[in-house]
Amino acid sequence: MPKRIRIGLIGAGANTRLRHIPGLRAIDGVEITAVCNRRPESTIAAAREYNIARTYLTWEQVVADDEVDAIVIGTWPYLHCPITIAALQAGKHVLTEARLAMNAAEAHHMLKAAKQHAHLITQVVPSPFGLKGHEVMKELIASGYLGELREVHVFSFNAALADPDAPLSWRQDATLSGYNMLTLGIVHETLMRWTPPPVEVFAQVHAHCPSRIDPASGVRRGVGTPDSVQVLAVLKNGARATYHFSGMTPFGQTANIQLFGSDGVLCYDLGADRILGASRRSGVTAAKMAELQEIPIPEGKARAWSVEADFIAAIREQKPIEFTTFEAGVAYMEFTEAAARKRANALKWNHR
């Protein structure tokens, strides 16, 4: 019989309900035994819906429960650090939702605690972008398909914030989300699986919709994070990278990572999970380099969502965590905070 593992949920939000609860319940010997949400009524509702035996008023009570072996954190980022550190100190494994923390300092505190309790498993819910074709991308890059990486272009345009009458989202409340902006951090996480890390960052940000109604108070207030972000970066190998993210584009939504090298180009369509490319190494002539062809992702190499299974396997069998380690989470929090702190002051002038 597999080792019994008892899970305490702190924050049974959308992704926890969509992925973590069914993912954990599909594994033999795993039981979800406790739950705590922000509000008592939502805690009780989640317990009834998923037949969870124990409910708590505070997350501290879940962490202190001797009948819980591992904590799954589904809260907004403002609680990720205190819950993680308390859970590790209580001898419990931790799976925390992305984004890892409010800022880089918190992320480093979490990593330090994880290292101090190295016998416990710590995992960050990974960016889902690019998982399907990850193995193919790694193989192509390792084979020299790109040659020398020179330019990187990353963009994501969606309509998540395009309605100006929509209420203030927790993602735009800096007291809840910290330095996290749009999907910059998790898409950067995907990019870092395939390229060297950044060493310099320069950015500008903007809020096309500078204020929204706070649903909690009914009062209009300024947004705490931008809805448009542009970043310039220098990667460790000298390649130049540009990022452009917006949540204010109701038409023409798209998301893509493009890698341009001395010998080839790879484009990962993050929405469709498709890889397009062309390379001299595969016999494409210079005249044909603009004609990108789809690169198949064989069924045997296509990754599927396995976060919950990976977490439990790491606890039971000491299998190493690949997606995503706290070290990787620290790296994308450092990048995100650097972009937020180094945003440019726009230079304005009058045309004559």
Image (tube, grey):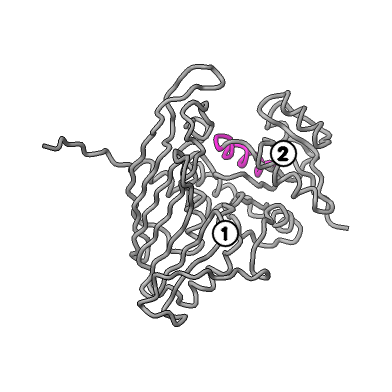
The residue carrying mark 1 is 273
Q: Residue 104: x, y in percent? A: 46, 44
Magenta-drawn stretch, dominant element (helix, strand or loop): helix
Residue 223 drawn above or below residue 156: above
Q: Label 2 sits on what residue type?
A: Leu
Regarding mark 2 in the picture, which secondary structure is present there? Answer: strand
Is residue 42 covered in magenta? Answer: no
Q: In the figure, residue 300 lies in which quadrant? A: bottom right
Answer left or right for 166 relative to 240: right
Hey, which residue is sitting farthest bottom in the picture? Answer: 283
- Binning the other alpha carbons within 10 Å of mark 2 as few (below 14), some (14 to 19) or many (20 upward) gives many
- Binning the other alpha carbons within 10 Å of mark 1 as few (below 14), some (14 to 19) or many (20 upward) gives some
Residue found at x 57% / y 59%: 273
Q: Label 1 sits on what residue type?
A: Asp
Quadrant containing the N terminus is bottom right
Regarding mark 1 in the picture, which secondary structure is present there? Answer: loop
Answer left or right for 99 relative to 54: left
Give the residues in magenta. 77-90
Q: Toward the viewer: 234 or 85?
A: 234
Answer left or right for 299 relative to 133: right
Quadrant containing the C terminus is top left
The residue carrying mark 2 is 9
Q: Residue 72: x, y in percent? A: 69, 43
Q: Residue 56: x, y in percent? A: 75, 29
